[in-house]
Image: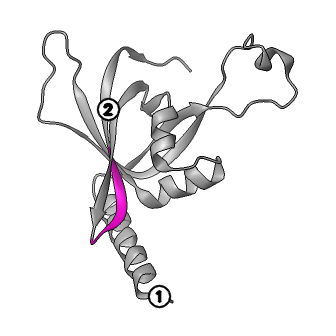
Amino acid sequence: MPTSFSSAEGVRRAFDTLLRNGPGRSVMLRIHAPATPGDATEQLGLAVPQFQDVELAPVVFRKTSARATAGKAAERDLLVSATSVQALTSSHNFGSAAEVFASAFGVLVDDALLAIASANELESGGQVCGYRLALRETSAATVLN
């Protein structure tokens, strides 16, 4: 096995371990449900968009030091394992993690749906080991099940 592969795996495992042993939890990423092949209403844009919630774990959810000010919503940070994002990317036919986060409707934390303001790679030794999502509260953050 090449050295670069084993070091990349080691970095990811170490980051996953940190997330699991910290104040870790799981959250749901709300993404578009796959289209139904041959559905004329979807092809014409007449169907109501469907969403599905996909679990992201392990993650660490934390408040940022910046506070909400008048006209600006409070932001939160979500640290996500690159291992779980890679599994999601391949299982739902996304081209990259950036595509996953750009097309996601938001992140469901408990009963609040938070918008993804930005997504950044976390690297160690030149290897992506996780992602930092900046989440923003929306005006209608509570989600009814």
Answer with the quarter of the image where residue 117 lies: top left
Q: Residue at x 88, y 27 (%)?
A: 38
Whichever of callouts 1 and 2 sits on the residue coming sooner in the sequence is: 1
Between 2 and 111, the one lying in front of the other is 2
Q: Residue at x 46, y 35 (%)?
A: 102
Q: Is residue 18 above or below residue 46?
A: below
Mark 2 secondary-structure assignment: strand
Amino acid at pointer 2: Leu
| Residue behind mark 1 | 2
Amino acid at pointer 1: Pro
Please provide percent x and percent y for residue 40: 85, 18
Q: Give the number of the mark in front: 1 or 2.
A: 1
Q: Residues within 10 Å of mark 2 (few under 14, many from 20)?
A: many
Stretch in magenta: 125-132
| Residue behind mark 2 | 135
Q: Residue at x 38, y 27 (%)?
A: 114
Please provide percent x and percent y for residue 44: 78, 13
Instruction: Give the alpha-carbon distance from disc 1 to disc 2, as whole Å.
Output: 37 Å
Q: Quadrant of the C terminus?
A: top right
Please provide percent x and percent y for residue 100: 51, 42
Q: Is residue 129 magenta?
A: yes
Answer with the quarter of the image where residue 32 lies: top right
Q: Is residue 113 magenta?
A: no
Q: Is residue 34 above or below residue 111?
A: below
